[in-house]
Each structure stands twice: as C-alpha cells, then as structure tokens.
Image (spheres, helix red, strand yellow):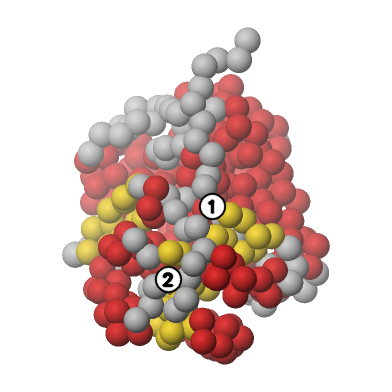
Amino acid sequence: MVAPFRYTASAAQVIFGSGSLNRLAEAIAGQGGKRALILSTPHQKAEAERIAASLGPLAAGLFHDATMHTPVDVTERAMAAYNAAGADCVVAIGGGSTIGLGKAIAYRNDALQIVVATTYAGSEVTPILGQTENGQKTTIRGAGILPEVVIYDPELTLGLPVNISVSSGLNAMAHAVEGLYAQDRNPISSMMAVEGLRALKQALPQIVNAPGDIEPRSEALYGSWLCGTVLGAVGMALHHKLCHTLGGSFDLPHAETHAVILPHSAAYNAAAATDALKPAADLFGGSLGGGLYDFAASIGAPMALRDLGMKEADLDHAAELAARNPYWNPRPIERKAIRALLQSAWEGARPREC
C-alpha cells in the first residue's frame, strides 16, 4: 500500500540538450523579458560577455562579481547595477554563486530569472536562497525565488575542470541522499533521487577519464537536474545544515564542503533511515557512508576539511553552531556526535556507521 503523501511539481521550464543555449533569446522574450542583466562570476566574465553579445538589444548590461555564499553586500551592488541598466530580468550564467545572486535579486524585486547552468550545482531548480551577512548564512524558501526558465546545454560544461566537475557532482548527489530520508519525502522525489544518483555515479568517473566526451557530460547534467529538483521538493536536514554552517561561518568552498561532508552525514543517519536509504546503499555497495567515501576517493574528490582550510581549533565552534537551533533529522542532533563527525571529516577518515 502506498502511504499518503503530498507532492508539489516544479514550475520551472527546463530546456535541455546540446545547442540549447541558442534558445536563450527565445526564452527571454517568451517570458516577456526585454532588458536582461547578465550575471556571472569574475572567472566566467568572458563567457558572459560572449552570450550578452549574442543577445543584442536584449542584453541591458553585465554584472560579473557574483561571489560564493551570496554575500548581501554583493547583492546590493548588483541591485544598483540592475536599476541603473533599466533591466526587467536577469540571466544567471554559471553555478551556485551566480544562481544565488539571481535569486537574491528576484527575492528583492520579483525580477524574471533565467539560468544557463554550467555546473552540476542543482540550485537552479530550487525555490531556496542561501545568503550570507556578518558571517552567518541564512536560508529563505519561497515560490518567487525559483527561476522561471533553466537552460541545460551540455556543451557549456565541456570546459568545466575535472576537479570542479567532481565536487559539483557530489554536491548534487548530497541533495538526493538527503532527499531520500527527508521528513516530507514522497514516491516522486525518491524516484528522482535514485535516478539522479545513478546518473551521476555513472557519469563522474567517465568525466574524470574523458572530460571532453559530451555523453557523460550530458548524463551528469541530467542527474544534477534531478537531484536539484529533489532539493527543491523536500526539506533538508543534517547534511545541508552542516555545510551551511561551514560555508557561511568559516568561508569554506561550497561544493567541496558538500563533497567532504556527504559520506559522514550519510553514515551518521544510516542506522536511523535504513529503509529509506537502501536504494542508495545498494548503488554504492551496502554501507552507504563507506561506499560514498570510496566512490569519492576513486574520482579524486577532496576528502578532508583540513585541506579546504578548516582549522581543527574551530571544530568545537562549528559543532556548537550546527546543533544550536533544533531542526528535523532522522537521527537526533547530538553535539558530541556531531563533533566526532566533524573530526572524522577534518581528518579525511573513512566514516563508520553507528
């Protein structure tokens, strides 16, 4: 018998496939946009300029200072650029940093958002905004935060460095793993989570071995879309709380932090969510935490928080922050156990399920 559930479908329009970037102008006009502010990180400025040039008069200007963890002061500068350009929509080109900036603008002025996704972040299909101010990262959820259109063109990911591809893919996988044991999970979100994990497990090793091969790039982008959709459909728990704490308060890199923490958070919750996590455990060899750790190691992922710049002396404070405000998790949040989890992740040790 199927248990009762509630499922809210995503309202985002997805345009997927090689060459789909060519439909960007059509997507803007189709949503009623006339003057788009193009957003990017400094690293992707040249790509953003090329895309802006292809849009002609639809491009109102360019803001290329999108920053990790969406600092509020950067958003305020982007808002000034948006208003000065007379823009009526934003086009975010890139991954989580740029997508977050587009969401932050839309949250403040209800701007139309279109995303051209070039990583496997998955945040482009979620109604969730994480932003940082005064060393604290806060999360806001709302329908107006969800981008209206997302373009997935695998050709745009061919130049994504292997190390970033690996971390970004594991970041997406974290959404799916947490989605499987979410308090409000449902058969649709769980089905998407398992398929997303399967696609990324298949694609990432192939990308490591042949980064210029379009087929695994397409498979990874497909998997990240599914995992991101799961993140937007259900509530998250320990894993995302830890990563937001480590990123917002200790300025650790976003995707790499997810990659390091994932095996440890999965191991922490494994015994409390055995049935829910069984499909993922089967994919990775039975012991989910250990299996994820071995998979990450096999594709050259970052394995230790200390390698990301985390100081061992800060682990006590991080555990305190992560346990400070109660939130739902399949296993109770125990400060001592969280501190042990963080120690293991800092050392890069293989997790033990308990």
Where residue 256 appears, as percent x and y from the top left, is 49, 61
Residue 343 shows up from this direction: no
Q: CA distance from mark 1 to mark 2?
A: 15 Å
Q: Total of numbered circles in the picture?
A: 2
Report the quarter where the N terminus lies.
Answer: top right
The residue located at (60%, 15%) in the rendering is 2
Q: Amino acid at mark 1?
A: Ala
Secondary structure of the residue carrying tag 2 is strand
Categorize mark 2 by other alpha carbons within 10 Å: few (<14), some (14-19), many (20+). Answer: many
Q: Which residue is mark 1?
A: 12
**Residue sitting nearer the eye, 271 or 253:** 253
Q: Amino acid at mark 2?
A: Cys
Secondary structure of the residue carrying tag 1 is loop
Left or right: where does residue 131 sit relative to residue 116?
Answer: left
**Residue sitting nearer the eye, 236 or 81:** 81
Residue 268 shows up from this direction: yes
The residue located at (49%, 67%) in the rendering is 32
Q: Is residue 336 above or below residue 72?
A: above
The residue located at (35%, 56%) in the rendering is 130
Q: Which residue is mark 2?
A: 89
Left or right: where does residue 202 sit relative to residue 171?
Answer: right
Where residue 309 appears, as percent x and y from the top left, is 38, 67
**Residue sitting nearer the eye, 168 or 28:** 28
Q: Which disc number belongs to residue 333?
A: none
**Residue sitting nearer the eye, 240 or 109:** 109
Q: N-terminal of the two: label 1 or label 2? A: 1
Where residue 5 appears, as percent x and y from the top left, is 51, 22
Where residue 295 appears, as percent x and y from the top left, is 66, 50
Left or right: where does residue 74 sit relative to residue 155?
Answer: left
The residue located at (34%, 81%) in the rendering is 86
